[in-house]
Image (tube, coloured by chain):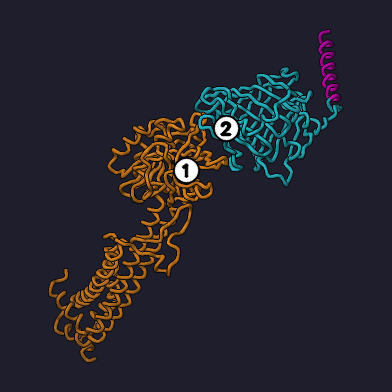
Amino acid sequence: MVAGSTLRIAWRNLWRNRRRTSLAVAAIGLSVALVLAYYSLLRAYADWVLATLTGPMLGHVQVHAPEWRKDRAMDRTIEDVASILDALRRDPEVASATVRVYAPALAALGEEGFAVIVMGVDWEAESRPGRLLAGAPTPRSRGRVLMGRALAEMMGVREGDEIALVGQGADGSLANDLVQVQGLIETPVDFVNRQGIVLEIGEAQTLFAMPDEAHEVVVHARDPDAVELLASKLAGLPNLAGTEVLDWQTLAPEMVSLIEIIEVAGVFALVLIFVAASAGVANTMLMATFERTHEFGMLLALGAAPGCIVRMILAESVALGLTGAALGGTLGLLFVAVTHETGLDFAALTGGGPTELSFAGLSWSMRFYPSLAAGDVGRTILAVLVTSLIASIWPAFRAARLEPARALRD
Amino acid sequence: MARARLLRAVALSASISLFSGTVESFQKPPDVEAILTHLDDLYRSKSSTSRMEIRVVSRRTTRTLRLKAWSRGEEEVLVVIEEPAREAGTATLRVGDNLWNYLPRIARTIRVPPAMMLGSWMGTDFTNDDLVKESSLHKDFVSRVERRSEDPKGWWLTLEVKPEVVGRWAKIEFLVSDDWLPIEERHFDRKGRLARTMRFDEVKTLGGRRLPARLVLTPTDAEGQSTELRYLEIDFDVPIADDTFSLSRLEQTR
């Protein structure tokens, strides 16, 4: 137990050389601030990847009929979707659940047919922020559809045009109808823009002869970090018996590495902290103990126990580290506080590059929203604390082992 | 005594099989080109009208369509659905490499784009491509007689796609009976996998020709799925109005 007096003395000793201590505090503080800013960007990146990936299209958990993912056959449907949705929405860990229909079809404005995918969706669920149709106009009346902008350009379709849709019902029958294009959409999902015609789910179910059936259930979890658990729990629901319930990691395994890379980067940051803090602390404490050899000799001669000297130096070192960490923590949190709401625009930061980039069939906005978890700050401070202790062990024991007589002579 | 009879019987049967073996080895392989030309013409002739029934068996349901078809030469085909009532009047017109569908419910004619040629035709296991590519067997493929088939008796022909042809099938194996009727056709995709099998049976006389009235198409990778086509009547070399194969006529098919 370090007595209060030891801390007081350590604190006072620390500031005997103001300039040296200030420099050390500044060095530690700066590296802590940088590491925290770095952590917050890593988090921004992870959130960005996850939100872009799971928000509009994938969701956190998806349900399909077995084999549907292999051939996307019209007749591989999930039945009784209304009761499935009820069951899913009752689960407190489910933030939202919605169903979709995917039907390959032929669309034509005039005589020329084009291959399209007709998607039946729940307007309301898909227009929430971050979802597929966020910001799109949602049709209110029957027979109205939204069309991917790139597809519309290829087909020469303009808003308000009437187009023919021809496909095949889930029972193999011929499905055809005329619909009016209410709006052209630019979603974050490439294939929807290039091939998609979006129809209200109920109308799609009627058109394709699949009442109360769908091809896909998309679930968003309240806690995106506990998706695996949620998926295995949902798989146990009696309503979902005989279906395939998968988390997004299984659905898009190639994307998991995009997020896993963050853990490696996080370890890097911790190493950085160790190097910066240990250099600052070790140097300061070595200087401080060398120049006070005479003083330590005096204390030992007066009967101070070596352990007391060790404690004092360790306390000094910890005080130095924590002061730096406090300064850095404040700066780091300040950075996050300033950037969290509005986000960082990477396009502007890199000198007016593209505001969006296209990858893996998705468009990725170049805006990041830094954030920090308490664990990030705690881990960083702990790292500084441990480093400070380790870096001062040698100076402390060197001081404690001094022979009072010789030390006094120096 | 009994022993001698048995020996004679064995000797006789041995000589019969030896004899039939000799006959086989002397049987001259047929002229492949002639067979293919014959097969191409079998259901078509210069012109034809026909009624047929298509039964589509899928995982979910079995659907039956009744169709009426007109053809002239190799390039012109018109198929109109007569039943079920819900789809009656729906028609497909082929002229050359172009394919149009007419949909009476929405009164629209739509040309099938090249990208959809491998899509299902009217919900069957036939593709749109099957309606267009039917005639190009001896144009696109190099054919040879592969081997003799004993049961059923006939010849296996192998058709390999010409290197410059971009198509769906890399190889077709064709079993043709000794009287030049198709028995079985196996289609292999570009990766050399068996993609589907067509079997022809119920040989009878239709329109004055002996031909298999039934064709069953079974895709390899879709379990429990098949399409069965049965000719109910065919008339060959009948006069067909010139405007039959036109878009304006297509829209009056009902």
Q: What residue is shown at x 35% (from left), y 36% (from top)?
A: A236
Q: Position of residue A54 (x, y in %)?
A: 39, 49
Residue B15 falls within the magenta-colored stretch: yes
Which SS type dominates the magenta stretch?
Answer: helix
Q: Residues within 10 Å of mark 1 (few under 14, many from 20)?
A: few
Mark 1: secondary structure: loop
> Which of A357/A241 is in front?
A357
Q: Position of residue B82 (x, y in %)?
A: 58, 23
Chain with colour cyan in the figure: B
Q: Quadrant of residue A348?
A: bottom left
> Which of A384/A134 is in front?
A134
Query: Going by the image, does B226 lie left or right of B158?
Result: left
Query: Going by the image, does B172 lie left or right of A92?
Result: right
Which numbered tag is attached to residue B102?
A: 2
Q: What residue is shown at x 25% (from left), y 80% (from top)?
A: A22
Q: Which residues are magenta?
A: B1-23
> Which of B25/A59 is in front?
A59
- Relative height, residue B128 to residue A29 (above, below): above
The quadrant of the image that shows the C terminus of chain A is bottom left
> Which of A343/A272 is in front?
A343
Q: Nearer the viewer, mark 2 or mark 1?
A: 1
- Relative height, residue B30 to residue A386 (above, below): above
The quadrant of the image that shows the N terminus of chain A is bottom left
Say which residue label 1 marks.
Answer: A161
Residue A117 falls within the magenta-colored stretch: no
Q: Quadrant of residue B69?
A: top right
